[in-house]
Amino acid sequence: MAKHADLSIDFLGFKCENPFFLSSSPVSSSYDMCARFLDAGGGGVFYKTLTTTIPEECSPRFDAQRKEATPFIAFKNMEQTSDKPYQENLDMMKQLKEDYPNKLIIGSIMGMDEDNWEQMARDVTATGVDMIELNFSCPQMTYEGMGSDVGANLELIDTYVKAARRGSHLPLIAKMTPNVEKMEPSAEAAIKAGANGLSTINTIKSITGLDFDSYTALPVINGKSSISGLSGKATKPIALRFIANMAQDMNLQGVPISGIGGIETWEDAAEFLMLGARNVQFTTSVMQYGYRIVEDMISGLSIYLAEKGFEKLEDFIGIALKNIIPADDLERDFKILPQINYDKCVGCARCYVSCMDGAHQAIDWDNEKRKPTIKEDVCVGCQLCLQVCPVYDCITPGKVLFKEEDQFGKGSLSEWKENASNKRDIIVGMYDWI
Ligand SMILES: Cc1cc2nc3c(=O)[nH]c(=O)nc-3n(C[C@H](O)[C@H](O)[C@H](O)COP(=O)(O)O)c2cc1C
């Protein structure tokens, strides 16, 4: 039987049985929905954001970004906060906490002004939930000064965190907007004002596509549309960079981060954890595939960690952070040539076309034999061919060549050469992940 690592992990003083959470959205918008996720094994839920008045929603309200045969790679929504009466939501959260005392239940709120933030924090605290998330990040609120308007405004962050703190003694988690160049100033402002943790990312302002008859962005609502939030797999790279930036920020050291953005599988989740997130949340993947994706996440992550020799998840958190360095610190004195495994090559010529039109004309093509050959003297080792090849393991990293000594400082070349074989293992080792 496969060995399993311990996935339990502390988050702001609460011992969670695993790091897998629903993020605040339709997937966590009632007692019944949250209960089904918790029964499937989830570690906890961030309940759908409450406002004291129910917002008016439009129909339709979704669109998706597709590519070739994929169902969709990103998802646009125009939805705001909960469509259920305020008191009904409070009652459901109370019931959830009573019925699931060992799961982490987090209320999410969005106020309209200081008094409203304070009152909502007080009301949610009275339900008995464990923590409160402050939604500073929904990009499609129809009221000014709410959602991502707050997340990009340091003064409003300060005012509303303090208001929520007056209404609650519970840990407060600020949910940050990715619709900024740098998230750290907003995060630092939230922590300085009294927040205890951070969640990120919420959705990214977007237009997914246009309708070619009505000349309107999608979805079309009576002939018009709006810019609104993008989520799902294609947003993961953006989310990961925000997580890394925050986890490396000297002023945010020790602040627990909850990672969100395009998480569908245990591998996606592991990437956030490696960059310092202590748990992960997801919505779009549940909207596509249902709550039971959490079963695969639990078994996949615990088996992977055990295979890698980790007894507990805690030891894995942030393990990749030391390897994310500024671009000017990267070593640039070698190139790794691609190698083609001709037993696997199907002769599709995609490597040839991409190299010819998109790179350095470093692949020869034999049309008779439908066979590509790498021109080693021209190849710069960019490995575009490896990225476009449709056959797994057909093109892999091969020979490591060091640049001429006079192209970079003397001394380092000889050091490099001494360690060459070892270096190659390290360099090539990273491709195990592909
Ligand atoms: C339809 C929809 C509604 C959402 N509603 C909320 C909300 O009420 N509060 C909130 O904090 N985030 C909300 N979100 C954002 C998600 O919680 C999450 O931050 C975002 O979708 C990125 O994660 P994902 O790629 O796993 O979906 C919503 C997302 C979607 C798709």
Image (cartoon, rainbow, N blue to C red):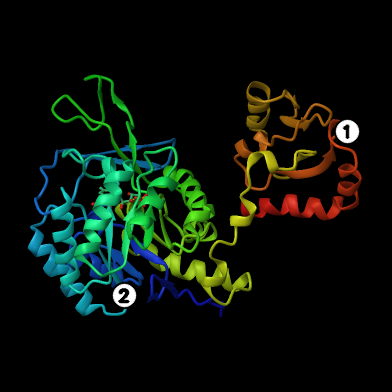
Disc marking residue 404:
1
Image coordinates of residue 342 in percent, x first then y, are 75, 41
Q: Is 364 left, or right, of 430 in this rendering?
A: right
Q: Nearer the viewer, residue 14 or 386?
A: 14
Specify the amino acid type for callout 1.
Glu
Rounded to the nearest whole Å, what is the CA distance between mark 1 and mark 2? 59 Å
**Residue at image coords 16%, 31%:** 221
Q: Is 96 left, or right, of 23 in this rendering?
A: left
**Residue at image coords 10%, 42%:** 56
Crowding near the residue tagged with mark 1, few <14, some 14–19, many ≥20 C-alpha atoms within 10 Å: few
Q: Nearer the viewer, residue 352 or 102?
A: 102
**Residue at image coords 46%, 43%:** 238
Specify the amino acid type for callout 2.
Lys
Image coordinates of residue 69 in percent, x first then y, are 43, 39
Crowding near the residue tagged with mark 2, few <14, some 14–19, many ≥20 C-alpha atoms within 10 Å: many
Disc marking residue 103:
2
**In which image quadrant can residue 235 be found?**
top left
In this view of the protein, can residue 334 be seen by the observer? yes
**In which image quadrant can residue 207 be found?**
top left
Q: Is 181 left, or right, of 82 in this rendering?
A: right
- SS type, badge 2: loop
Is 307 placed above or below 85 here? below
Task: Answer yes or no: disc 1 within 8 Å of ligand 1.
Answer: no
Image coordinates of residue 154 in percent, x first then y, are 33, 44
**In which image quadrant can residue 43 be found?**
bottom left
First-in-chain label (1 vs 2): 2
- SS type, badge 1: loop
Q: Nearer the viewer, residue 18 or 291?
A: 18
Is 363 placed above or below 306 here? above
Q: Nearer the viewer, residue 276 or 211?
A: 276
In this view of the protein, can residue 48 be seen by the observer? no
